[in-house]
Amino acid sequence: MFYPVNDDNVEETKIKSVNVSGDGWIILCDTGYSFCVPGDSQIVPEPGMTARFHGKGKGYAVRGLFLDDVEVFYSTEMEAKEKNEIDMYGADTSEWLSRWDEGKSVWSIEMGGLGPGYEQAIQITCAETIRHLLKKQYDESLWDEENDVVWKHDRDETESMSFENPIIKNLGLLGAQWGAAFNLALKFYRNGPIKIMNDVAVKDRHIQVSRVFP
């Protein structure tokens, strides 16, 4: 077995004991570290085996495990980072909206700063605006916000949608709320949730929101 090259974030230990847990196993290592080996592992863990863990150590996710030179699972640091971001934020804006519709918490950017009710109205409007943008499938590469008939048409059509959407109408939005929601929706549509949440300019404004308001 050839281990991954240029990957020095690794720790080797011996398995002290093994217990069946669900469709997998809980292994206890000599270091006192316990770990759940998934049931689809191509090797059954046994006491005395060498367990090789890839990751940054305690407090961080394990991204690779080998038992006696047999790979159980493995991903590079970059692959693990990408998977973690998809799990957290959604692979794209469509997935973000699907999570919102299911009532799950989603990551977003605080836009109001004037209390939870004010902010919730912005986030609801953002989600409904995203829904419209995804349905229309506007070609944002044609948008020139300075002077372009395509941008003006798509913008005006989106604004008209907000006045007709019963969910948005019932919120009784202020102009500032609509503007904040519209700008946030455009960012999601053009960039996707992962790029937005990685923007250092808004790193201090990350919030979790849900259509199911507490």
Image (cartoon, rainbow, N blue to C red):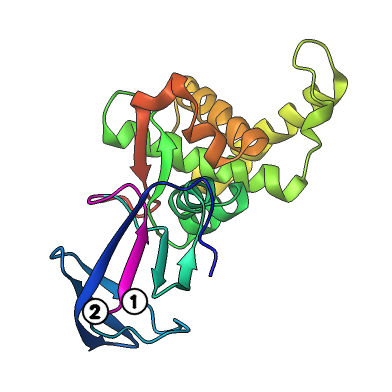
Residue 49: which quarter of the image? bottom left
Residue 169 visible somewhere in the drawing: no
Q: Residues within 10 Å of mark 1 (few under 14, many from 20)?
A: many
Q: Where is residue 19 shown, x and y percent of the image?
A: 21, 86
Apparent side of residue 172 relative to residue 150 in the rendered image (left or right)? left
Looking at the picture, which amino acid does disc 2 mark?
Answer: Ile
**Depth check, front residue: 129 or 141:** 141
Apparent side of residue 27 relative to residue 166 in the rendered image (left or right)? left
Q: Where is residue 39 shown, x and y percent of the image?
A: 39, 84
Q: Residues within 10 Å of mark 2 (few under 14, many from 20)?
A: some
Circle 1 is placed at which residue position? 37
Residue at 18 percent of width and 64 percent of height: 33
CB atoms at circles 1 and 2 under 8 Å apart?
yes
Residue at 49 percent of width and 63 percent of height: 74
Which element is circle 2 on?
A: strand
Q: Where is residue 195 shown, x and y percent of the image?
A: 56, 35
Residue at 55 percent of width and 64 percent of height: 2
Apparent side of residue 171 relative to residue 6 in the rendered image (left or right)? left
Residue 200 visible somewhere in the drawing: yes
Residue at 78 percent of width and 39 percent of height: 138
Which element is circle 1 on?
A: strand
Query: Where 12 sits versus 9, above or below?
Result: below
Q: Is residue 54 magenta?
A: yes
**Depth check, front residue: 166 or 135:** 135
Query: Where 87 sits versus 174, above or below?
Result: below
For the image, the number of numbered tags is: 2
* Magenta stretch bounds: 48-59
Question: From mark 1 to mark 2, how far is it between C-alphas?
Answer: 6 Å
Residue farthest top in this picture = 146
Q: Earlier in the sequence, mark 1 or mark 2?
A: 2
Circle 2 is placed at which residue position? 26
